Amino acid sequence: METEGIYLCPHCGEEIVVPLDPCAGREQRYTEDCPVCCSPNVISVTFDEDGEPSLSVERE
């Protein structure tokens, strides 16, 4: 099971690593500031039946 996800910040293009917690629910959506450019991103994570994550991000 994956415990980290990677996405490209839609504001600055930097690769960002975020922790993933399947215990927080199968579908998760939260806002987090990019640690590089400080712009807000909406992160969506969905875990399938096997616990594999799917991660997407968009500008807030």
Image (tube, rainbow, N blue to C red):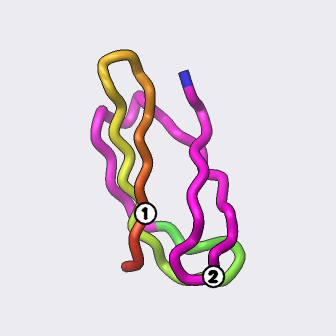
Identify the residue shown where x is 36% and y is 32%: 47
- Position of residue 44 relative to residue 38, above or below, is above
Which amino acid does the dot numbered 1 rest on?
A: Val
Magenta extent: 2-31
The secondary structure type at the circle numbered 2 is: loop
Label annotation for residue 12: 2
Using the rendered view, name the quadrant where residue 13 is placed. bottom right
Q: Earlier in the sequence, mark 1 or mark 2?
A: 2
Identify the residue shown where x is 41% and y is 55%: 56
Q: Residue 27, position in %: x, y?
A: 28, 41
Say whether residue 26 is magenta: yes
Which amino acid does the dot numbered 2 rest on?
A: Cys
The secondary structure type at the circle numbered 1 is: strand
Disc 1 to disc 2: CB gap under 8 Å: no
Q: Nearer the viewer, residue 15 or 32?
A: 15
**In which quadrant is the N terminus drawn?**
top right
How crowded pointer 2 is (Cα within 10 Å; few <14, some 14-19, many 20+) is rated as few
Real-space CA distance between mark 1 and mark 2, rounded to the nearest whole angstrom? 13 Å
Identify the residue shown where x is 59% and y is 32%: 3
Identify the residue shown where x is 55% and y is 82%: 11
Q: Nearer the viewer, residue 45 or 15?
A: 15
**In which quadrant is the C terminus drawn?**
bottom left
- Describe residue 52's horizontal placement relative to residue 38 as left or right: left
- Position of residue 41 relative to residue 43, above or below, is below
Label annotation for residue 57: 1
Label annotation for residue 38: none
Say whether residue 55 is magenta: no
Using the rendered view, name the quadrant where residue 9 is placed. bottom right
